[in-house]
Amino acid sequence: MNDDLCGSRMVHKDKVVLAKAQDLREGEVEGLSKLLKLIAEPGRLRIIHALDKQEMCVCDLAALLNVSESAVSHQLRLLRTSDVVEKRREGTVLYYRLKNNRLQELIDLGLSILNYPCVIENY
Amino acid sequence: MNDDLCGSRMVHKDKVVLAKAQDLREGEVEGLSKLLKLIAEPGRLRIIHALDKQEMCVCDLAALLNVSESAVSHQLRLLRTSDVVEKRREGTVLYYRLKNNRLQELIDLGLSILNYPCVIENY
DNA sequence: AGTATATATGAATATCTGTTCATATATTAA
DNA sequence: TTAATATATGAACAGATATTCATATATACT
């Protein structure tokens, strides 16, 4: 095995070089990580799934999730600043809806992977 | 507006009832949340993306990510206990590889959503 | 203007998550 | 068996994240 310039061992230099060449770019990693974390939290996941079907106000979502309106509001702010949802005012009520309509695809794909978790074909 | 039995307000009972009917089941939420969180962490994301192309050992991955082997080992344990990866021993070297070969689909879909973030069609 | 409703927000707290460090285990070589 | 290599793991610490609580804001109604 050979040492690299940074001091860490490297048993298979060829593999590491190849992996680095195929690695995601930093921006892709950051963006994807942020997107997936947004959807991964159970409350936000259910909010996104619900808003994909109809627009709802804060207290509706609070009732759905059975948590405080303040907690929902904080989550919605995150989703808003991440351009996942947007709001529409009607009197004192703010209706939230999905701004990014492709997130449900991600949810559906994730669910399908959970149902058919492992299909190893040929090794 | 009407109060529900649980004490929380509910501005639009119809919407909440509909949302509850369409809501993900608890097991789906938990499973999906866990899966997405696994992929969402930048280091694990890159590990999965790398192992989708070739099997690699712990110190190769440590060199790729530029972190300690211990840190990688902890992450790999998480991925192992979640059935995302599996290991194969060859002498003292443990080669890791993906056990669930559908995760790259999720990564690819996520990337495509990042590139075409928002396509609102008709409201 | 004053009150009520619906939501937003800051700060504090609590919880979760990831890394580090020290140490343990497993395999190979001498 | 002793030493070396490669990896695993537990505990402690640090950082990120979510909720709560109190308070602020915006709109509507009187």
Image (spheres, coloured by chain):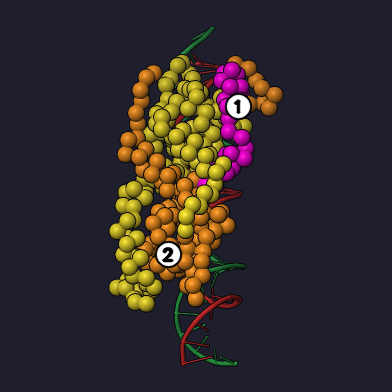
Chain colours: A yellow, B orange, C red, D green
Alpha carbon of mark 2 to alpha carbon of mark 1: how far? 44 Å
Disc 1: which chain?
B
Label 2, secondary structure: give it. Answer: strand
Q: Residues within 10 Å of mark 1 (few under 14, many from 20)?
A: some
Q: Quadrant of the N terminus of chain A?
A: bottom left
Q: Residue at x 35, y 40 (%)?
A: B112
Label 1, secondary structure: give it. Answer: helix
Q: Residue at x 32, y 35 (%)?
A: B116
Q: Position of residue C20 (x, y in %)?
A: 46, 68
Read off the magenta span. B9-35
Q: Taking the image as drawn, is residue B45 in sight?
A: yes
Q: Taking the image as drawn, is residue B78 in sight?
A: no
Q: Is residue A75 left or right of residue C4?
A: left
In the rendered view, tell whether residue B60 sits above or below residue A81. below
Q: Tell me the tag on residue B56.
A: 2
Tag 2 and tag 1, C-beta contact below 8 Å:
no
From the image, give the main secondary structure of the stretch colored magenta.
Answer: helix
Comes first in the chain, label 2 or label 1: 1
The answer to which image quadrant residue B119 occupies is top left
Q: Residue at x 55, y 54 (%)?
A: B83
Q: Position of residue A45 (x, y in %)?
A: 51, 37
Q: Is residue B111 left or right of residue B70?
A: left
* Tag 1: amino acid: Lys
